[in-house]
Image: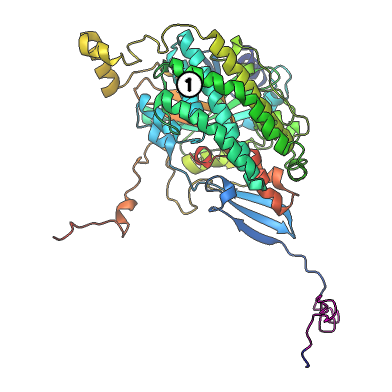
């Protein structure tokens, strides 16, 4: 893993760059969300980075580990360069009251499904996404289950099912 | 109207006219041809969707204009469940993702945890893992070949591939006691060594296996129906394949040389000699050919690993992470304490984030773990190849006939348990 990638992003987008981190030989670059599509396009087209494949997009809800509302959500892009054989974790930090970010679908087509999943389970909106709908859950589902405030066992509506016995059987 | 038998008494042939009425005059309010798109629902209960996948097809005649996959019928919220489980408790849940190749899922998950912990594996453990992962790849590809040909209409091959798959499943049963949901890998190694009788059976299987692949090839390679139903079906260019995030055989079928085992060698893949088969047309036939070649390469890898198999333990000796063996727990105080802590509380990895990619039979299976130093992961994300591949489904299905849709499902080797998680 070469830390020059982080330098390149910092030189090219000095106002967007927040920080970098290296852990277990993996480079993480944190940026502001506003110009994510430009950063993505730069990382894809620059021959020294050449991140031509988007491996994954996922999101982290930071409210479970005492982060402020300014950095409630993280959208994490895992990039892979097939020609250069290196990877990068690009991270955008979102505020709680403005949890939306531009879609990187014009850069990598793989983002179409991956962003729908993030929208479905974490409730982060992707601007200019061609088809932003829930992907796993039904359209009338209430809430976004991967957020930390959502209980793992559900919100109790299962107990209202009629076919579950609610009273002790009479003997 | 007088009834007249349609049969000619002298020849016995049916001679009834096709239309017994005068053809209707063509008027403006009854045009000859109506062009209208037809919405057709396919699934979720359909034998060719490999689980429960629903697709809404927009058709013009028999041509597919648009195919919209509707997922989520098998969504169990594994990622949310994992946030409430310790790292070891997650391993059996990974079995249920891609239930056809559970060993590969176990492998991908424990590799991610080991990367987070910084634990290394004894050499014999690495070899055993490689052998098991390649056996699982053969099982996965055999399963794919059988079901794909069954979907297309060739029934014989299904029985043949399941005959060989059975031998490997029996071996898995002898190795770990289960046939489908194995739960065999552990953080730090594997649960139990390969016994000599298992190795002997495996060697015997490997001796016969290449001739079995040739048998399948004889049935399919020059089969006109197979060729016309797979050649030039679901074509994707190399550029699009990379852009849509395809990995594994669908990416290599388009001629892109990318295999995680070669790009970032893990386990014993760097120590054995093998090749990455590449296609050129990016159609279903090339992906079929690649999977056949990969099975041969897997057999090669297993044979070399068995020859090189070193002596030693298969589980690493890090008592904070790996539970000590039961005999030691019964005799020695310290082992008892470690055992107690691991099974009541779990181990605490360092704070950090890792992503670890593994080449599963279906493509790149990756686990991202966000740890905040607690015994449970703060966030766990599974990058499943089936889900990413389905993102390209619409792109690859447009313009083909409705009869090709089962071929296009099958060409990715899709498993909905992994796709919906």
In the rendered structure, the answer to whether residue A80 lies left or right of residue B384 reads right
Point out residue B332 in the picture as x, y percentages from the top left corner.
22, 8
B262 relative to A147, above or below: above
B317 relative to B73, above or below: above
The span picked out in magenta is: B4-30
In the rendered structure, the answer to whether residue B162 lies left or right of residue B57 reads left
Image quarter of residue A150? top left
Which of these two is toward me, B32 or A146?
Answer: B32
- Residue A1 in view: no
Q: Which residue extends farthest top?
A: B311
Does B19 lie within the magenta span? yes
Q: Circle 1 sits on which residue?
A: B112
Does A69 lie within the magenta span? no
- Residue A116 in view: yes
**Majority SS type along the magenta span:** loop
Local secondary structure at mark 1: helix
In the rendered structure, the answer to whether residue B153 lies left or right of residue A140 reads right
């Amino acid at each position: 893993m070469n830390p020059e990638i982080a330098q390149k992003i910092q030189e090219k987008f000095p106002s967007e760059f927040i920080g970098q981190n290296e852990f277990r030989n993996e480079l993480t670059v944190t940026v502001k969300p506003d110009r994510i599509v430009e950063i993505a396009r730069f990382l894809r087209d620059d021959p020294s980075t050449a991140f031509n494949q988007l491996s994954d997009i996922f999101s982290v809800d930071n409210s479970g580990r005492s982060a402020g509302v300014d950095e409630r959500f993280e959208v994490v892009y895992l990039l892979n360069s097939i020609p250069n054989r290196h990877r990068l974790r690009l991270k955008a930090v979102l505020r709680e009251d403005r949890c939306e970010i531009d879609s990187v679908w014009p850069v990598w087509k793989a983002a179409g499904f991956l962003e729908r999943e993030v929208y479905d389970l974490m409730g982060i909106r992707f601007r200019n996404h061609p088809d932003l709908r829930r992907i796993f859950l039904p359209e009338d589902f209430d809430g976004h289950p991967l957020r930390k405030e959502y209980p793992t066992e559900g919100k109790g509506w299962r107990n209202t099912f009629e076919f579950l016995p609610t009273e002790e059987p009479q003997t | 109207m007088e009834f007249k038998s349609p049969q000619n008494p002298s020849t016995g042939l049916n001679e009834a006219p096709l239309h017994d009425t005068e053809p209707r005059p063509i008027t403006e309010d009854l045009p000859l041809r109506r062009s209208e798109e037809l919405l057709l629902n396919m699934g979720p209960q359909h034998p060719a969707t490999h689980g429960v996948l629903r697709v809404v097809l927009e058709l013009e005649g028999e041509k597919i204009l648009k195919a919209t996959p509707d997922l989520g019928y098998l969504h169990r919220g594994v990622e949310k469940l994992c946030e409430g489980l310790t790292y070891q408790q997650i391993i059996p849940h990974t079995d249920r993702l891609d239930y056809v190749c559970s060993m590969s899922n176990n492998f991908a998950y424990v590799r991610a945890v080991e990367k987070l912990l910084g634990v290394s594996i004894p050499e014999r453990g690495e070899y055993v893992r490689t052998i098991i992962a390649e056996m699982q790849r053969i099982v996965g590809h055999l399963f794919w070949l059988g079901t794909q040909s069954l979907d297309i209409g060739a029934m014989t091959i299904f029985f043949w591939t399941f005959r060989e798959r059975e031998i490997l499943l029996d071996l898995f049963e002898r190795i770990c006691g289960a046939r489908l949901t194995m739960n065999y890998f552990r953080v730090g190694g594997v649960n139990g060594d390969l016994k000599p009788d298992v190795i002997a059976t495996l060697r015997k299987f490997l001796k016969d296996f290449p001739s079995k692949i040739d048998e399948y090839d004889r049935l399919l390679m020059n089969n006109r129906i197979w060729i016309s139903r797979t050649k030039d079906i679901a074509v994707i260019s190399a550029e699009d394949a990379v852009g849509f995030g395809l990995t594994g055989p669908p990416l290599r079928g388009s001629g892109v040389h990318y295999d995680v085992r070669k790009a970032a060698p893990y386990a014993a893949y760097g120590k054995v000699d093998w090749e990455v088969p590449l296609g050129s047309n990016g159609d279903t036939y090339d992906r079929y050919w690649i999977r056949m070649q990969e099975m041969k390469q897997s057999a090669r890898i297993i044979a070399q690993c068995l020859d090189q198999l070193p002596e030693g333990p298969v589980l690493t000796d890090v008592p904070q992470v790996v539970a000590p063996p039961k005999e030691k727990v019964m005799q020695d105080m310290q082992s008892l304490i470690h055992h107690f802590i691991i099974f009541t509380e779990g181990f605490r990895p360092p704070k950090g984030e890792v992503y670890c990619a593994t080449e599963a039979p279906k493509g790149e299976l990756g686990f991202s773990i966000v740890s905040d130093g607690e015994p449970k992961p703060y966030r766990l994300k599974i990058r499943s190849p089936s889900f990413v591949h389905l993102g390209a489904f619409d792109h690859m299905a447009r313009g083909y006939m409705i009869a090709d849709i089962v071929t296009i499902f099958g060409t990715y080797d899709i498993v909905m348990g992994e796709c919906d998680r």
